[in-house]
């Protein structure tokens, strides 16, 4: 960070966690109301050290162009498209905000955090090919997915992704879709850039190596936080009107400590991950796409296999995975006591019910933990038939905490996605869950503003500024094809991305 301001005694806003969510909310609030005072607390000594780090997330720029888990097949054989449409629209909104930040020179050049890369889905076998064909037909009805190509032709797929087709049985039935306008997003780089901007603003202070130990609301509806300096062990009290808990896997325990009624009954199920990282430059150069397949039965959505071209620290990388695992930690740098300490009287029943309903997931995770290097190589060979052990090494990915919540029918359900929990008075909000979180962070924060800053949101000043930051604000990109085309053309130009015309 470039600048540290003197601590504000009673900041207007406290952000817990120095990840993409806190960075996005902080940047939006500071643009909407420049005189707001903000304090940020991060328990690590680095920004974006957990889920926002490039090695800890997929970096796909989740826009539902290739992720098959967002388009499940229904019992009647049809394809559910609503989630895919919502995610695709939300990602366009994120690009609008990022383009604004670039235009205003509030963040560094777009090449540092976003690049064009084709998004592909690839499947094999009669049933999966039939599914992908149906998915393509269902999605091409929506202009958000205009330009999606579908083929079962081995030679065309080989032109697109030679690494996937080299050494494959020419008689095997395969299919692929391709969207040229896909992106690779380095959320770690974007997060650091946003915090560099934020900490240079008056009234904003960032505290690294600081952990929020406790929080409670007083009779005046202010929040009093107990914050500990991890280095000196010193504690101090901080009073604020509004708290955002964007601490990744650490959000659940702080939500429980807040004791708000809206937070009762939530639990968390941690899922860890690993990548196979290619270390052979010749192999890396043979692949230029993000290729997603179908998840195994019982696998969590975050474990959808993909052979993934990335740009990390300015270098091209190639990853395969993630391989799921289980740890009782809620954070990569967390404690093995995180899961047991999260179990409370108000969430034990939902957690037990969700566990009973997800026995296949438990079995899947056990199988993943027991995998040998040879097992992992065999999984890779399904996507890269000529893969050799010496060209790949294991890299530990991030830790995800899937949301468990009360359900009137099942008692408790395991949610795969992102959940924002807000107090009735709008004074505190916590973000739980995982993918597609980072990619849809801007839409998530607009929704949070509606819940927690309603009185300011509908003022002329805030409405005008929101429309400046996000020109489509208040309109539907999913329903207005002309608006989408104009928006994509503008953001693609500012962010130096491929457009449909050049694809």
Image: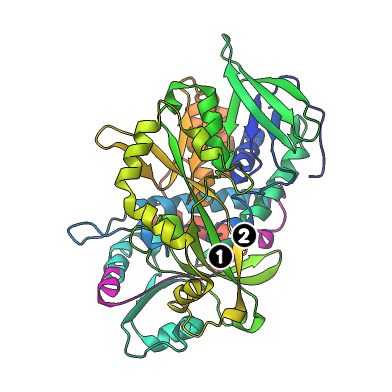
Do callouts 2 and 1 mark residues in contact (Cβ within 8 Å)?
yes
Q: Which mark is residue 327?
A: none
Q: In what quadrant of the picture does the N terminus appear?
A: top right
Q: Is residue 200 above or below residue 36?
A: below
| Rendered residue at 76%/39% (across/down) | 199
Can the viewer see residue 66 in this picture? yes
Residue 495 among those drawn in magenta = no
Q: Which disc number belongs to residue 275?
A: 1
The residue labelled by disc 2 is 55
Query: Where's residue 62, x and y in %?
Result: 48, 57
Direction from residue 239 to residue 432 in the image, left or right: left
In this view, the residue in front, 464 or 250, is: 250
Can the viewer see residue 459 in this picture? no
Picture residue at 32% right of the left edge, 85% below the top: 172
Q: Secondary structure at mark 2?
A: helix
**Magenta-span inclusion, residue 114:** yes
Dot 2 or dot 1: first in sequence order is 2
Determine whether, in the image, residue 88 is placed left or right of residue 204.
Answer: left
Q: Which residues are magenta?
A: 103-131
The picture quadrant where one finds residue 41 is top right
Residue 226 image offset from top left, x and y in percent: 67, 23
Point out residue 10 in the picture as x, y percentages from the top left corner: 71, 19
- Residue farthest left in this picture: 76
Q: How many other residues sit within 10 Å of disc 2, few (<14), some (14-19) or many (≥20)?
A: many
């Amino acid at each position: 960070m470039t600048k540290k301001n003197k601590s504000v005694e009673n900041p207007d806003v406290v952000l817990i966690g120095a990840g993409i969510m806190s960075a996005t909310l902080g940047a939006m609030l500071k643009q909407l109301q420049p005189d707001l005072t903000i304090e940020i607390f991060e328990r690590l000594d680095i920004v974006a050290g957990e889920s926002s780090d490039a090695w800890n997330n997929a970096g796909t720029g989740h826009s539902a162009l290739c992720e098959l888990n967002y388009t499940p097949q229904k019992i009647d054989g049809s394809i559910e498209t609503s989630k895919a449409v919502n995610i695709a629209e939300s990602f366009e909104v994120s690009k609008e905000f990022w383009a604004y930040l670039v235009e205003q020179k509030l963040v560094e050049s777009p090449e540092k955090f976003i690049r064009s890369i084709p998004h592909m889905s690839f499947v094999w076998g009669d049933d999966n090919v039939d599914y992908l064909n149906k998915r393509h037909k269902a999605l091409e009805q929506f202009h958000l997915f205009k330009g999606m190509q579908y083929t079962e032709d081995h030679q065309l797929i080989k032109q697109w992704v030679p690494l996937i087709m080299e050494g494959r049985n020419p008689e095997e039935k395969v299919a692929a879709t391709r969207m040229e306008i896909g992106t690779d997003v380095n959320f770690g780089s974007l997060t650091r850039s946003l915090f560099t901007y934020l900490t240079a603003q008056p009234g904003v202070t960032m505290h690294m190596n600081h952990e929020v130990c406790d929080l409670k609301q007083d009779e005046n509806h202010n929040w009093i936080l107990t914050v500990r300096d991890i280095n000196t062990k010193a504690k101090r009290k901080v009073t604020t009107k509004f708290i955002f808990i964007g601490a990744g896997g650490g959000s659940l325990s702080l939500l429980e400590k807040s004791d708000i009624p809206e937070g009762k009954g939530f639990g968390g199920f941690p899922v860890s991950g690993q990548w196979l990282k290619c270390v052979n430059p010749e192999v890396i150069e043979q692949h230029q796409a993000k290729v997603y397949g179908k998840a195994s039965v019982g696998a969590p959505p975050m474990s959808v296999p993909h052979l993934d071209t990335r740009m990390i620290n300015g270098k091209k990388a190639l990853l395969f995975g993630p391989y799921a695992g289980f740890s009782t930690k809620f954070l990569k740098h967390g404690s093995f006591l995180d899961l047991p300490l999260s179990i409370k009287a108000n969430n034990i029943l939902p957690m037990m019910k969700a566990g009973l309903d997800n026995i296949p997931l438990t079995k899947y995770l056990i199988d993943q933990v027991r995998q040998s290097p040879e097992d992992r190589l065999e999984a890779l060979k399904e996507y890269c038939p000529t893969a050799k052990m010496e060209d790949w090494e294991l890299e530990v990915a991030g830790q995800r905490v899937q949301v468990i919540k009360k359900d009137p029918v099942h008692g408790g359900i395991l949610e795969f996605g992102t959940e924002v929990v807000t107090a009735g008075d709008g004074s505190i909000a916590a973000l739980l869950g995982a993918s597609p979180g980072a990619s849809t962070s801007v839409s998530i924060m607009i929704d949070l503003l509606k819940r927690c800053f309603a009185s300011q949101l509908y003022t002329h000043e805030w409405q005008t500024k929101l429309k400046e930051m996000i020109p489509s604000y208040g309109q539907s990109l999913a329903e207005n094809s002309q608006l989408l085309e104009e928006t994509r053309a503008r953001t693609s130009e500012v962010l130096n991305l491929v457009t449909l015309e050049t694809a």
